Amino acid sequence: MVNIKNISDDFPILAQKINGHRFVYLDSAATSMRPNFVLDRIDAFYKSSAANPHRGVYALAERATAAYEGARAAVARFVGADTDEIVFTRNASESLNIVMYCHAQYALKPGDSVVIPISEHHSNLVPWQIAAAKTGAELRYLYTDAETGLIPDSEIERKIDKTTKIVAFAHVSNVLGLRFPAEKLVARARCVGAVTVLDAAQSVPHFPVDFHGLDVDFAAFSAHKMYGPMGIGVLYGRRELLEKMPPFLFGGDMIEYVREQDTDFAAPPHRFEAGTQNAGGAVGLAAAVEYIGAIGWANIESREAALMRRLTAGLAEQKRVSVIGDADPGARRYGVVSFNIEDVHSHDAATILDSFGIAIRAGAHCAHPLLDYLGVKASCRASLGVYSTEQDIDRLLECIPQVRRKLGYGD
Amino acid sequence: MEIDALYSEIITEHSRSSRNRRRMENPTVSRQGVNPSCGDELTLELREDGGVITDASFTGEGCAISKASASMMTDIIRGKSRTEAARLCSAFLGMIKGEQPDAETLDALEDAAALQGVSKMPARVKCAVLPWHTLKSAIEDLKDQ
Ligand SMILES: Cc1ncc(COP(=O)(O)O)c(C=O)c1O
Ligand SMILES: [Zn+2]
């Protein structure tokens, strides 16, 4: 199932030419590509088992239910949770919204605070703005050290206080690629009695994550960033919290019994899964989990760390390139690095690199408050996946000098 | 579109040029425009005297395409009447939407005609039209004064 020597051979989408060149995909933080193993599993589900889960007693319906619920169990093992603590959603954004709509808006009141790092993705930021506006609570930011990109301990001690009811943070920043100290943030939140929300969208593809081990209350991630399909994501919630929460959407499958005037809702996780679910997506996510397992974390982590060292060292050697948050060149980055080329807007850089077959992300990366805080308008971002190779990195590094040349800057 | 046609000499020269990239003293109208997809931001300033745009300039941050487009546009409209400027504006926006301008219009658009190829790059259309949309709003402001 895995071609360990040439992992990229498992990904048919990477075999194409783009603008006449070998395709170099360096935007896995936006969405990763999917291996044949995952695509085949989804295909097989729709070809042989796709009845409506939970809604029939015939053979196919039972097979579909087993596939869907089996996927939930596989995901739970993958992230160190119990099966009934895993809710399937559309994506990380929806998962975070459920925490806002079904927990935060009832838990917060004027005088309370929600604390998040300034570096959050809009998906883990806008819902908290809305929660604050709805409840009169304060939204407070943890500011990163502008040089290192990390949150100083003093900031954590000072901002998370007795008023704090929710601490939400990304495990790994989708702009800086730096890993935030989840243990420290959770410990401080526990100390003041706040609930913690972990945005694991950029961590689950790169290293093993254990929600019980981290002792977080909620967590969110998307399948499409970890070699699974688009349109399916996960909300993890501590059992006691999920049990106390009202449903998100109403409809079929999320009920226990419906009378003319009122309804008993199902227990979690089904309480939060109204209507026919993306069972094919769940099957694809479970296949992605299996695929990651087959490569093995030790392998993934050592490969990606070596590639990232090659990339950051190469960027540091470029004459007119500055990496964002680079005061500590040895800082470990997890799959993501952002940089700017002197005088060049990132969209021009991305258009020019695309003409060489290289896909990188340009713009503000859904993190306007961070870029405003850093005084940066936009940046280029290169990000890695299990299929990334040394040739990919070298091709990027070789083409970056072309960008200024194409724009007429000489060198 | 070929990359060398998108970033042709005439376009990159305009994008690097600071000739029209300046603040104006006492503009008749000053108008801001933003392109959220790229983060391009621009402030267009016009001075009008007796129905004629006597000076045009811009400031702001943006990609090469938006800066080149702004530089070309301010060159073209300087010395034109408000009505002529509005007509050129429709001609440029039409060209980027994919309409084939006649030879006379292409002539009137001067250097900006070089941006025609952007009409085939949906991701960059907003960059090229930003200065012209801002001009359209600025002309509306002039009418209201
Ligand atoms: C850190 C982080 N959080 C949340 C999200 C949102 O993920 P999705 O768009 O799949 O909901 C992303 C993806 O862009 C992300 O990088
Ligand atoms: Zn632009």
Image (cartoon, coloured by chain):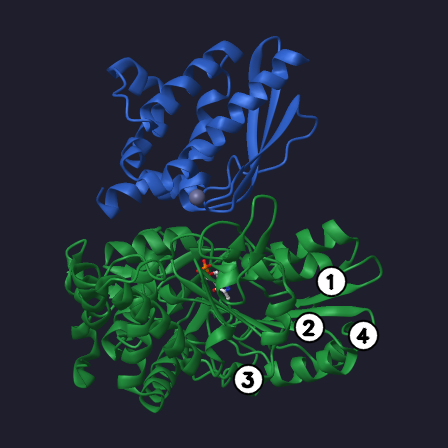
Chain colours: A green, B blue
Are marks 4 and 3 in one subunit? yes
Task: Say left or right for B100 vs A263.
Answer: left
- Residue beneath label 3, please? A212
Q: Residue at x 19, y 53 (%)?
A: A19
Q: Quadrant of residue B45?
A: top right
**Circle 3: is it few (<14), some (14-19), or many (20+) Cα within 10 Å?**
few
Q: In the image, residue A350 lies at what x, y percent?
A: 35, 55
Q: Chain of mark 4?
A: A
- Residue beneath label 1, please? A107
Are marks 3 and 2 in one subunit? yes
Q: Which mark is residue A59?
A: none
**Circle 2: is it few (<14), some (14-19), or many (20+) Cα within 10 Å?**
many
Question: Do residues under tags 1 and 2 come within 8 Å of each other at their CB atoms?
Answer: yes
Provide the secondary structure element on which disc 1 rests: helix
Amino acid type, callout 1: Ala
Task: Say left or right for A24 vs A245.
Answer: left
- Distance, label 1 to label 2, CA atoms, is 10 Å
Provide the secondary structure element on which disc 2 rests: strand
- Residue beneath label 2, please? A195
Q: In the image, residue A132 lies at what x, y percent?
A: 73, 55
Are marks 1 and 4 in one subunit? yes
Is A75 in front, or is A156?
Answer: A75
In the orientation shown, which residue stands out farthest toward the bottom?
A: A298
Q: Earlier in the sequence, mark 1 or mark 4?
A: 1
- Distance, label 3 to label 1, CA atoms, is 22 Å
Q: Chain of mark 2?
A: A
Question: Do residues under tags 4 and 3 come within 8 Å of each other at their CB atoms?
Answer: no
Provide the secondary structure element on which disc 4 rests: loop
Q: Earlier in the sequence, mark 3 or mark 1?
A: 1
**Circle 4: is it few (<14), some (14-19), or many (20+) Cα within 10 Å?**
some
Q: Earlier in the sequence, mark 1 or mark 2?
A: 1
